[in-house]
Image (tube, helix red, strand yellow):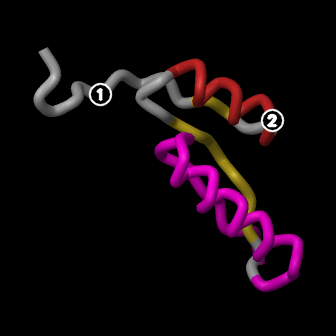
């Protein structure tokens, strides 16, 4: 079976915890998954994570609710 492809939306504080948990599950053999892409409202943060994880960076701009 092909690994589950995961997209991480949000590479900030909580995103890092989710990422560490997923990597632990993968390394422990509990899930067969891989990162497909990452996205964050702060481009530099997403770009940094994408480089570290060696995955694609999604750069689609989505309007933020309440933003001027």
The residue beneath circle 2 is 52
- For residue 31, what is the image quadrant? bottom right
Crowd around label 2: few <14 · some 14–19 · many ≥20 (10 Å) = few
- For residue 61, what is the image quadrant? top left
Label 2 residue SS: helix
Magenta range is: 1-30
x 52%, y 54%: residue: 14
x and y percentages locating residue 20 in the rendered image: 72, 61
Q: Nearer the viewer, residue 4 or 11?
A: 11
- For residue 18, what is the image quadrant? bottom right
Residue 65 versus residue 3 in the image, above or below: above
Label 1 residue SS: loop
The residue beneath circle 1 is 62
The C terminus: image quadrant: top left
As for residue 28 lying within the magenta part, the answer is: yes
Crowd around label 1: few <14 · some 14–19 · many ≥20 (10 Å) = few
């Amino acid at each position: 079976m092909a690994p589950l492809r995961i997209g991480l939306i949000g590479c900030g504080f909580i995103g890092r915890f989710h990422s560490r948990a997923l990597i632990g599950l993968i390394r422990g053999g509990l899930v067969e998954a891989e990162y497909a892409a990452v996205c964050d409202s702060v481009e530099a943060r997403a770009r940094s994570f994408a480089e570290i994880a060696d995955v694609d960076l999604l750069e689609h701009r989505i309007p933020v609710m309440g933003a001027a």
